[in-house]
Image: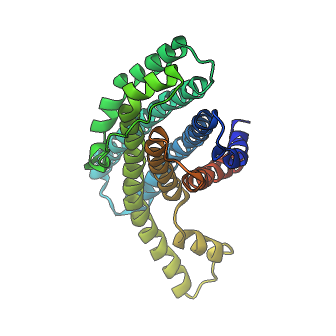
Amino acid sequence: MRFARLSIALLTISLLLAGCATRRLTQFNTFAQAGITYTTASQTVITDAGNATVSADSALLIKSRPDLEESKRRAYVTESDTKLRQRLQVLQLISAHGRVLQAYFQALASLSDPKATNTVGTAAAGVYDSFAKISPDLKNAKMGATSVSSFIPTVTAPIVAIFKVHALNDELKLRAKPIADELALQQAAFSAIASEFKTDAQELQNLQEADSINQFATSTALPANWASSRLTLLSTPVTVASADAAAKAADQLSKAWAALVADKLDSSGFTILMGDISNILTIAQTIQSAGK
């Protein structure tokens, strides 16, 4: 499985501080494998987010339907469908952006080969060009009333340390800052999703909590699942937690990238990065297990 690469990467951290000539190449390869793990896991998170947002919206519609006049129900569900389509389109954009990012990480892994040629660099450039077809739309995309662009953090151009491997050195000179921008866009996109999901989750939780309180307050027997439902109700929804985890992992990838190209990424930086990617990986594996 691709996910197993993360464990291999963790085992190589002890090698990253060695004084051998291949140290930086090993660092770049390890970073690339971590990035591949992140993008693979984030695809699972996006799929789950799409399913969860439809389910949550349907639950809200069902709860509100009895209080709506029949003449207003059609307009209400139509408006809700429009909002859902908008959100699902944003999720599709994030998914497409993540797939391009994964392809770039794969190219970066190839560039970390000491025998890499300019042909590999040309392939990396071709992958990067694919961002131009997706990134502008993702930046301008909206989740509710908020645009993804409003979540993009300020990105400082990384300082590129001279690298003796010409193919990788040339790539970093050209695209160290642009890739940092794309990583920041990933972070912003998942932050926007988390923000919107928190609003929806709170609205749904308020309705469900009212039901839970009413069930307890009445004289009728409590449902058998009342305690477990209450625990779920008061917990952070998985979709919110997973979007937050993806945003945090993207943020750490961005920080690690800046340190890496400047030849300042140490074992501590790798440990933090691997911890955040392990978190999203665990969430993705949990989602996959639940779906079986």
Residue 159, image x, y percentages: 37, 39
Looking at the picture, does residue 222 appear above or below residue 138? below
* Figure quadrant of the C terminus: top right
Residue 54 position within the rendered picture, expressed as x and y whole percent measured from the top left: 47, 47
Which of 107 and 87 lies nearest the eye of the viewer?
107
214 lies above or below 71: below
Scheme by which the image is coloured: rainbow
In the figure, is residue 181 to the left or right of 287? left
Which residue is at the far top?
119
Of the 4 image quadrants, the one containing the N terminus is top right
- Residue 146 placement, left or right of 54: left
The answer to whether residue 7 is seen in the rendering is yes
Q: Where is residue 124 in the image (x, y as percent from the top left)?
A: 49, 20
Percent x, y for residue 157? Answer: 32, 40
Nearest the eye: 239 or 4: 4
Please tell me how many numbered marks the rendered image carries: 0
User: Closest to the observer: 19 or 52?
Assistant: 19
Q: Compare residues 235 and 284 and report the one nearer the observer.
A: 284
**In this rendering, does residue 85 appear at all?**
no
Say if 59 sits above or below 235 in the image: above
Q: Quadrant of residue 207?
A: bottom left
Residue at position x 66%, y 72% in the image = 225
